Image: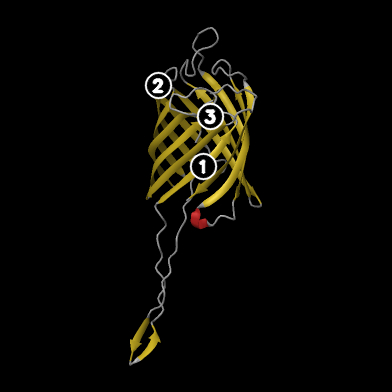
Amino acid sequence: MNKKYQAVLGIAATIGCPLAATAGEMEPAPMTPPPVEPESAVSGTLSFDLNSHFISYGLDVWADGNSWKGPTFNPSLELNWGIGDFTLILGTWWDVNGKVTSSIGGNLQEVDVWAGGSYAFGDFSVTALYQAWIYGGDTEEIVDVIFAYDCFLSPSLTVHNRVGAGAAPQTGTVLVAGLEHGFDLGPVSFAVPLNVGYFLDDGYHGTDVFGLPLDTGFGYGSVGLNASIPISFISEEYGAWDLHGGVTYYATSSDVISNPSSSFFTGNIGISCSF
């Protein structure tokens, strides 16, 4: 499951010019520059998305294959507190659909929560997150460590550690190397992300049709095309809103991940607010 998007709105305050009484007559007080309010230390992103598939580290969770029927609704919220070069991170993501009977209630299939922090060294950053994925009547526990460099192609490496199996088959580690190129065409912003997942432990996503643990090694590769456009009619007083969407192509190894189709396209559309 790949989750990473932040913006801060600065608020400038102005003051009026009081009148001062001198020698029995009113004169304007000397003009002084208005104080400059510091940028808010708190920022965040609220998103409401419809996804054709639920893909978790290459696994087609709901076994949709090449079908786009019955999308899943995925709201999410992430908050960030900036303290110098350090950022405190809190977030949540939900999976809502009627594909199976929910162990939580209604159509709410999964609730993920995470907490952690990120530290920046110039253009280089290291992020550590503890995550609890609540589904299937249990809690899968994750510790992610993400190394990223803010430059051309934005290279990153995620060390994804499943430290508590919960309803998953077992614990284990996945390495995900990523690149992303962004560009603008008029008001529309585009991004082309590329990711490759390598599995370090047998049976991370369970067993094959013979009941044997799935292999280690290359598990999946993905490439996408995403676009977003600002929703300009909403005042920035209410945050910076955008409409976004995209498609992603996945190629997975049947020796490592047991999917109904080894290659497939996924789609996404949603709105988000950055503040």
Question: In which quadrant of the rendered view does residue 225 lie?
Answer: top right
Which residue is located at x 44 percent, y 64 percent? 12
- Dot 2 and dot 1 residues touching (CB under 8 Å): no
Q: Where is residue 164 in the image (x, y as percent from the top left)?
A: 38, 23
What amino acid type should be assigned to the residue bearing mark 2? Gly
SS at mark 2?
A: loop
- Dot 1 and dot 3 residues touching (CB under 8 Å): no
Q: Rounded to the nearest whole Å, what is the CA distance between mark 2 and mark 3?
A: 21 Å
Q: How crowded is mark 1: few (under 14 residues within 10 Å), some or many (20 or more)?
A: some
Q: Where is residue 144 in the image (x, y as percent from the top left)?
A: 42, 31
- Dot 2 and dot 3 residues touching (CB under 8 Å): no
Which residue is located at x 58 percent, y 27 percent? 221
What amino acid type should be assigned to the residue bearing mark 1? Ser
Which residue is located at x 40 percent, y 41 percent? 89
Which residue is located at x 51 percent, y 48 percent? 273
Q: How crowded is mark 2: few (under 14 residues within 10 Å), some or many (20 or more)?
A: some
Q: Residue furthest front?
A: 106
Can you tell which mark lies on residue 97?
3
